[in-house]
Image: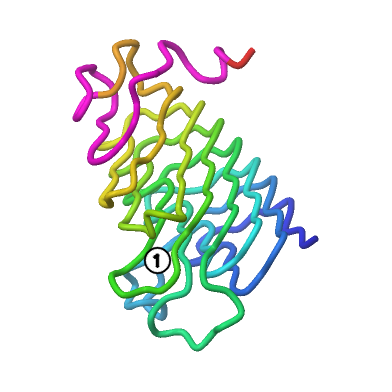
Amino acid sequence: HNQIVRLNARRVSRGVSLQLATNTEIADGSIDADVAPAWDGGGTSYGVLIGLAGDTSIHGLELGSATTREAIRIAGRDSQTCATEMTDSAGTAITGNNLHATIAGVHLFRELGDPGAPTNVTVSCNTISTSLDGVLVDELNAATSPVLVTRNDISGNSAGVRNLGALTVDANGNWWGHSSGPSGAGSGSGDAVLGAVDFLSYLQNFAVLDAD
C-alpha cells in the first residue's frame, strides 16, 4: 500500500504523477499546478496525473487554480510506451475533493490508437467547479470501462459532464447548480451534460446537504 499524503505543492506542472503503480492512496492537502515551458512546451499542468496505475484512491485534496489545466487526468497505456506490465488504469476512486481547473476537473483520457484506458472509475462526493468541463470523458474501451459520477456538486463549469465516447456515463444523483437539473441534453438550468450521459435522477440541492 503506497501513501502520498498531506501534500502542499505550489507552481508545479505535475503535483503527483503515477506510472506502473498499484494500490496507491493520494490524500489530504492542496496542489496548485502551473504550466512550465520545459513540459510539453508549457501547454499542460496537472494536479494529479495517473499515467498507468491500478487501484488508486484520491481523496481530501484541494486541486487546481487559474493556471491548472486539469485537476486530475487518468490515462491507460498509450501507443508510444514500451510498458507491458499493465494496460488499463483500473479501479480509480476520486472522492471528497475540491476540483477546479481551466480545462477539466477530471479528464478520463484516451487518444485514438491507445491500447489502454481508464476503467472502473468512480467520481463521488466532490465539488467540481469553474472548469471548461467538470468531467471530460474521451472515447474509452466501451466493453470494459464503466464510469460512475455521483453525489457531486457540479456547478460553474461550461459543461458539467462532457462525454466524447459511445459508452454511457452514469451521472445520476448529482447537483448541477440548479434545482431544475442540468442543461445541454437536459432541460434544466444547471451545468450542461453533453454526449452519452445518464442524468435523469438528479439532486435538487447540494450533495453534501443531501448526504447528511
Q: Secondary structure at mark 1?
A: loop
Residue 138 location, quadrant: bottom left
* Relative to 98, 117 lies left or right: left
In the displayed structure, 70 sits above or below 149; it is below
Frontmost residue, 122 versus 136:
122
Instruction: Return the residue found at the far right.
Output: 1
Tell me what residue is drawn at x 77 percent, y 62 percent.
2
Which quarter shows the N terminus?
A: bottom right
Please give the residue where the numbered disc 1 appears in the rendered image. 35
Residue 133 pos. (x, y %): 31, 43
Apparent side of residue 119 relative to residue 103 in the rendered image (left or right):
right
- 150 w.r.t. 147: above or below: above
Q: Residue furthest front?
A: 143
Tell me, yes or no, whether the highlighted magenta stretch contains residue 77. no
Q: Residues within 10 Å of mark 1 (few under 14, many from 20)?
A: many
Q: Amino acid at mark 1?
A: Val
Left or right: residue 15 versus residue 22 is: left
> In the image, what residue occupies the spot 28% across and 52% down?
165
Image quadrant holding the C terminus, namely: top right
Give the image location of residue 87, x and y in percent: 52, 72
Q: What x and y, as percent, mark residue 88?
A: 52, 66
Residue at the (45%, 12%) spot, across then down:
205
Determine whether 31 is above or below 150 in the image.
below
Residue shown at 41% from the left, 74% from the top:
115
How is the protein colored in the picture? Answer: rainbow
At which x and y percent is residue 100?
43, 42
Segment tinted magenta in the rendering: 183-210
